[in-house]
Image (tube, rainbow, N blue to C red):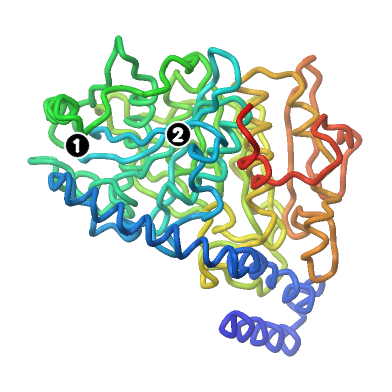
Amino acid sequence: MFRVWGVLAGVVVLLVFGAGSAAAFDPVTEATNFSKTLERQATYLDPPVQLLLRRVSLQNGLAATAAQARDPEREFVSDLCWNGVDGCAGDPRLYDWKSKDYGLVEPVLFTARNGATLSGHVWATRSGPAQRPGVVITNGSVQADEQMYWYAAQALAKAGYVVLTFDPQGQGQSDTLGEGADAGEGTPSQTDGRPFFDGTVDALDFFLSTRARPYEPRPSCASGTSHAAKQDRRVAAGLDTGYNPFASLVDASRIGLAGHSYGAAGVSYVAQWDPRVKAVVAWDNLGEPAASGVAGPDGASLGEGSCVDASQRTTPPITKPGLGISADYGLPATPNLSQPDPDGKSAASHAYTAAGVDSGELIIRGGSHLDFSYIPNPAFGASLRGPDLAAWYTTAWFDKYVKGDASADARLLSDRWRSDPLGAAVDPRHDPNDLSFYYHSRLAIHRADGSAVGCEDLRDGCPALTSDDGAGSAPYSYIKTDTSPDR
């Protein structure tokens, strides 16, 4: 905290005495806005939540050690968040989801195309229709295990989806290396990139597997080797999962992808490349699909795209609706030194619009790159309402473009995030508008009746926005949604 405020003080001094290059930029306002990255810590530093985090961390550490001992063929202890302790635990309030009768969840293990064992969970509810749409969520990189995205997975499950969360290779409890000749494929994942591109396809293959069509990994990218024998052997030994345990609930014709950071780059590509996917939501941030040199959240090159075979490493056209959700600050979160480009976060969304495809880009005021991954550690600053806003719009986007629910229009065009009492309560200036004043938040979509809606600055408001979104007057909370009884 002291380091953050020291940076802020330096920014104020720099800009007060070096003003003139950005006359409209107010360093005091910037300091106040940047302080919002300290909001989330008030939740997990609350003593009861800290006690819960200690209990969850102990349970996670013991379970991870036991899992490695039971299954020595796996090797995940060199991953940063292998034991799910403390800052790797995610939101500790979301554990015991099944035992507390909030919903259904089953752990899964399956073999990636390069022979690495991937770890994950599948989420659903008892209540709901017999056939439901599905969503696969791909993590970000480094300190980004699947627990950090359970808030969104559980919210989607409560909204009537079957959801797969998984750790890409080198993350959480998935293997660090592949097998045999492919041991080096996808390593290190932060520079190789394939665990977030090919890994998303592998996870989607597993998600759509059934008892009649068990999961078999595709041939590896580097050598063309099949690691199906490893998958079959481990299934027979009761180690790997043969197929999606909730396969009977999944409507394979209605599938969405969501991802964060490097995972956002992966799903932005795969959603357009893979004919099984209907829509995508990218958390910091939506990218234009490219076969190689895929652009990441700040325009940086994030490596190679899908590597099924050379003929398929092509740039697909934009045909699937894509929503980007970003935040005022990146990684690491650093204060602005001048007025940002108001459209600096929405280039990909504008490219979707130019292609005639529905899109949007929403920017969380005072949020950071870590608003989308719940890290309960003060060193990783994030806003309080960022994950709630992300869960709301992610669900609404998939409701419209994956589920085909006409009522989703009202939720996407809701006015609630411009007048959010929970956001105002923690904001230094009690501003109830959770959308950035630096960057334009936009929606360019077609309603269910075919009429076009274009709003290029949701913070200021547009005639299409509505206060009647069908969700009641209470502020949205992913915690209340996720921990409601499964009826």
Callout 1 touching callout 2 (CB < 8 Å): no
Residue 231 in percent (x, y) is at 18, 28
- Identify which residue, 204 or 192, lies in the foreground: 204
The numbered disc on residue 105 is 2
The numbered disc on residue 114 is 1
Residue 4 in percent (x, y) is at 60, 79
As shown in the figure, which amino acid type bears the numbered disc 1?
Asn
Q: Quadrant of residue 183?
A: top left
- Residue at x-position 79% and y-position 56%: 422
Q: Kindly give the residue lying farthest to the right in the view shown.
A: 463
- Specify which label sits upstream in the sequence, 1 or 2: 2
Say whether residue 292 is left or right of residue 78. right
Residue 377 in percent (x, y) is at 51, 68
Q: Quadrant of the N terminus?
A: bottom right
- Residue at x-position 32% and y-position 61%: 80
Q: In this rendering, does residue 43 appear at all?
A: yes
Q: Kindly give the residue lying farthest to the top in the view shown.
A: 212
Q: How many numbered circles are shown?
A: 2
Q: Quadrant of residue 9?
A: bottom right
Q: Quadrant of the C terminus?
A: top right
Q: In this rendering, does residue 187 appear at all?
A: no
- Residue at x-position 48% and y-position 27%: 272
378 relative to 114, above or below: below
As shown in the figure, which amino acid type bears the numbered disc 2?
Val
